[in-house]
């Protein structure tokens, strides 16, 4: 049992070391790419990011308005679902 635990701890250490190496490689690649960006590419990336945020917020507001309209029509349906003739019969 102790041998299995020791083996798993060794495996865990290897995995952590590998993860750290991969994270460092990724960080180096990101830094290298960031340094190689031109001003035009930087502007384009920022505009894409802002566009995405604006699009998300607009969709959020539109969905909220749609929900409000649906509530209004549901209330009207509830109010007028019974016809006048049915009311008279009752």
Image: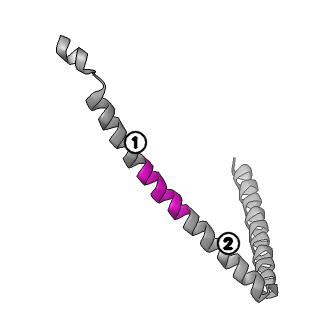
Pointer 1 residue: 70
Residue 89 x %, y %: 19, 11
Please tell me whether the stretch drawn in magenta is mainly helix, strand or loop.
helix
Q: Residues within 10 Å of mark 2 (few under 14, many from 20)?
A: few
Q: Which residues are magenta?
A: 56-66
The reply to whether residue 61 is visible in this rendering is yes
Q: Residue at x 79, y 84 (%)?
A: 37
Image-based side of 16 in relation to 68, left or right: right
* In the rendered image, the vertical position of residue 11 relative to residue 50, given as above or below: above
- The spot of residue 87 in percent (x, y) is 20, 18
Seen at 74% across and 52% down, the residue is: 3
Q: Nearer the viewer, residue 86 or 39?
A: 86
Kindly identify which residue carries mark 2.
48
Picture coordinates of residue 88 (x, y %)? Answer: 18, 15
Q: Quadrant of residue 28?
A: bottom right
Nearest the viewer among 19 and 74 is 74
Left or right: residue 5 compared with residue 85: right
Q: Which mark is residue 82?
A: none
């Amino acid at each position: 049992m102790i041998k299995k635990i020791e083996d798993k701890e060794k495996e865990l250490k290897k995995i952590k070391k590998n993860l750290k190496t991969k994270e460092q490689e990724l960080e180096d690649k990101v830094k290298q790419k960031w340094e190689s960006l031109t001003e035009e590419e930087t502007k384009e990336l920022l505009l894409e990011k802002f566009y995405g945020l604006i699009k998300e917020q607009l969709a959020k507001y539109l969905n909220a308005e749609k929900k409000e309209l649906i509530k209004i029509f549901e209330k009207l349906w509830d109010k007028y679902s019974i016809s006048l003739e049915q009311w008279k019969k009752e």
